[in-house]
Amino acid sequence: MPGEHSKENLKSTIPPIFHDRHQKWLYEYYGPPPIELPVSTGEIDIYPRALPPHVRETLNNDLKLRRRIYQPKISELSRNARVAGRGRHTFIIKPKTMDNLLETISGMKTHKNEEVRRVLWDIYYLGKTAREAESKVSGKTLTRHLIAAERMLEVMSIDQLKEMTIGVHTIMVSHRILRYARDALIDIRPFFKGRIF
């Protein structure tokens, strides 16, 4: 509802691109989407990556245009998630679940657990690639730790595990979709029904 969010809460949920007075008013009026991706210092500014700089600049100042462009992108990723094979790693990890996975990884008795936790945090919360995060571990190591943490926490049911497997792609897609949702105030739940954990 309009006016429901306190100013203190808004400071932590409004991305820097919304600090223009008009954009901030729209964000305060509509409020954040039900599943929020927190704003983190060091986030990738060049976003969405595939767009030319002048288009990104326009998007930064136009919520309605962001909604018009981001919603089809979310819809496309949602359709991909339901394609046999391609969608096996395409589902959404909520921030609370990700925090639990990272905490579980930190507690693992492996000599690479802290590096894995750091890299996965950078991918999920900052939108970096493993290379941009300057990862010192392989993609296989990241995935192995993710799968082990998921099994320890039982994030997914046995039946869901037959169709889905968590991996680095899952973390990257989660960031992308939640950021689209955050920056364009879109509810992703209808798009990813049964694929949000």
Image: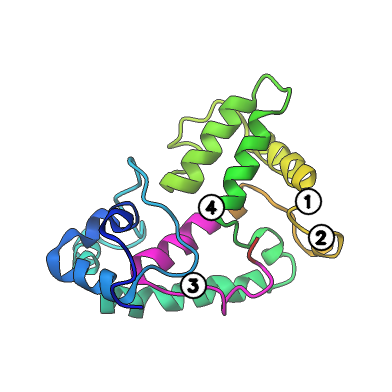
Disc 3 marks which amino acid?
Answer: Ile
Disc 1 marks which amino acid?
Answer: Glu
| Disc 3, SS | helix
Disc 4 marks which amino acid?
Answer: Pro
For the residues carrying marks 4 and 3, which lies nearer the camera in this image? 4
Earlier residue among tags 4 and 2: 4
Q: What residue is shown with label 2?
A: 157
Rendered image quadrant of residue 120:
top right
Rendered image quadrant of residue 24:
bottom left
For the residues carrying marks 3 and 2, which lies nearer the camera in this image? 2
Earlier residue among tags 3 and 2: 3
Which disc number belongs to residue 99?
Answer: none
Task: Looking at the picture, tell me which residue is in the foreground, 103 or 177.
Answer: 103
The residue depicted at 30 percent of the width and 77 percent of the height is: 2
Magenta-span inclusion, residue 138: no
Q: Which residues are magenta?
A: 174-195
Q: CA distance from mark 3 to mark 2?
A: 25 Å
Q: Is residue 136 above or below residue 133?
A: above
The residue depicted at 37 percent of the width and 72 percent of the height is: 185
Q: Is residue 184 above or below residue 170?
A: below
| Disc 4, SS | helix
Q: What residue is shown with label 3?
A: 74
Disc 2 marks which amino acid?
Answer: Ser
The residue depicted at 24 percent of the width and 68 percent of the height is: 59
Rendered image quadrant of residue 90:
bottom right
Which disc number belongs to residue 95?
Answer: 4
Q: CA distance from mark 3 to mark 1?
A: 26 Å
Q: What residue is shown with label 1?
A: 154
At label 3, counting other C-alpha atoms closer than 10 Å, the crowd grade (few under 14, some 14-19, many 20 or more) is many
Left or right of residue 93: residue 162:
right
Earlier residue among tags 3 and 1: 3
